[in-house]
Image: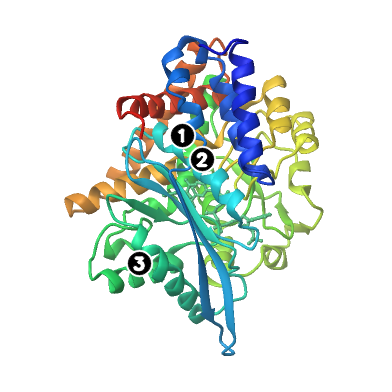
Amino acid sequence: MNHPKGSAAYAESVMETVISRNPQEGEFIQAVREVVDSVSIVIDKHPELVRGRILERLVEPERQIMFRVPWTDDKGAVQVNRGFRVQFNSAIGPYKGGLRFHPSVYLGIIKFLGFEQIFKNALTTTPIGGGKGGSDFDPKGKSDAEVMRFCQSFMSELFRHLGPDVDVPAGDIGVGDREIGYLFGQYKKLTNTFSGVLTGKGADWGGSLVRTEATGYGLVYFVSHFLAERGMSWEGLKVVVSGSGNVAIHAAEKAQQLGAKVVALSDSNGYVLDEEGIKLDTVKRLKEVQRKRIKEYAAQHSSAVYDETRGGIWTVPCDVALPCATQNEIDEAAARTLLKNGCKAVGEGANMPSTPEAIAVFLDGGVSFGPAKAANAGGVAVSALEMTQNSMRLNWTFEEVDSRLQGIMKSIYDQCVSVADECGRPGNLVIGANVAGFMKVANAMMAQGVV
Ligand code: NDP
Ligand code: 2IT
């Protein structure tokens, strides 16, 4: 450590630069602050990382690409969206991370997601760097043909920045099987190559079994470890899951398979509460096939009620809460309500779903807390296994991939626990995840010189 006033002042000086260089990117600043605060606990022991200005280098993306995405809607009108790919860090492997299509997307969202991805990917034990991309395009209410034309236009620019050893995108909010298919088709046509340049592909054309389920299943595997720590299992627990997309559905599915009762799911309009237990067949049909709203669930099950109160899902009493929708969906007040109602464990399926104030409520209140970078890493971990299978040109069975996923989630949990202990903060998996991910990337950056 060579900052004259010590590690806290060093962390503050890094943050000052981040804030002045990235004004108005609140989500990015929030994500960086959490990591910088965690790392400041260990930075005293690593003067070489301070001299190498590793933190200052880490917060600056290696490359940021922004591009125009023009497309024609079904009425023949020309539409223009904005596309992004932030190639954040390639110290331990090719850039890897999803694409988000949602009207709220702007550079600050993609940078927060790309920054988180660096450390998450490092925790997976697989060799992948961090990146993220997306667009402010809203797939809701668009026809399949419109989504296809949009994806083709998006890929017409993005393809020149990708490659199986360069940058490998996947899905995120608003990007699922359908979008990955159209994006892959256009990449293949433009480059005349069939390569593992995207993950989340269909199982018959280069995809990996378990990738669809991986984030939600991985989340539940992760939470199982800290439930066990408290002498608990999923059997009979009451679980609330926010969202009703890919991550939410598969988290709910695995929790149910392990004996839990999932009573609530949501979307951006409201939530459904079914005290008899959510019937996932209905949810899958509504969301995956018919692309309808979660409200429809209550119309089809008399045991369910629908409520549009903002954040209302967090007032439902539960043993375990799994936020699987979006960033900052649990604020301090919601966290206090969960705690008051007896919630014992929170596992983050979404990226950064809890505000810093909410996390403090959980940690201070003795709630077992699994931070996103660790708890939702199962998706990108199986993406890395898809890359492995593509390189080997063979496919593993469902059981093989699922057992590797379970092993990876256990290893992530163990890393977080042991690094939290080493940092003198036993049980604080936020610090454990941030410091473990940071040290792996920092050491790789030091080894590779000033690049
Ligand atoms: P989907 O698009 O499949 O589902 C998103 C769900 O979240 C929908 O129910 C959606 O509701 C809801 N949602 C999205 N934006 C908002 C918002 N601004 N306010 C309230 N609700 C919202 O996405 P995924 O399930 O893939 O992603 C969910 C979360 O998990 C995201 O944070 C993502 O970054 C994270 N994640 C995803 C991974 C993956 O493999 N897919 C891996 C790791 C993390 P509505 O339909 O109304 O928009
Ligand atoms: O946030 C995430 O980890 C993802 N959306 C998955 C990224 C990936 O490359 O599979």
Residue type at the position of mark 1? Phe
Q: Depth-wise, is mark 2 or mark 3 nearer the camera?
A: 2
Quickly name the residue at label 2. 115
The quarter of the image holding the C terminus is: top left
Residue at label 3?
A: 184
Question: Which circle's residue, 3 or 1, is located before the other in the chain?
Answer: 1
Residue nearest the observer in this picture, 158 or 234: 158
Residue at the spot x=46%, y=69% of the render? 154
Q: What is the spatial separation of the Cα atoms under label 3 and label 1, in whole angstroms?
A: 27 Å
Residue 204 visible, this angle = yes
Q: Quadrant of residue 372?
A: top right
Residue 388's place in the image compared with 73, above or below, is above
Q: Earlier in the sequence, mark 2 or mark 3?
A: 2
> Measured from the top left, where is residue 306 in percent x and y?
76, 59
Relative depth, front residue between 367 and 441: 441
Q: Is mark 2 within 8 Å of ligand 2?
A: no
Q: Which residue is drawn at 40% across and 33% down?
A: 122
Query: In the rendered image, is residue 258 in sight?
Result: no
For marks 2 and 3, give the CA distance.
25 Å
What residue does disc 1 label?
A: 119
In this rendering, the answer to whether 362 lies above or below 170 is: above
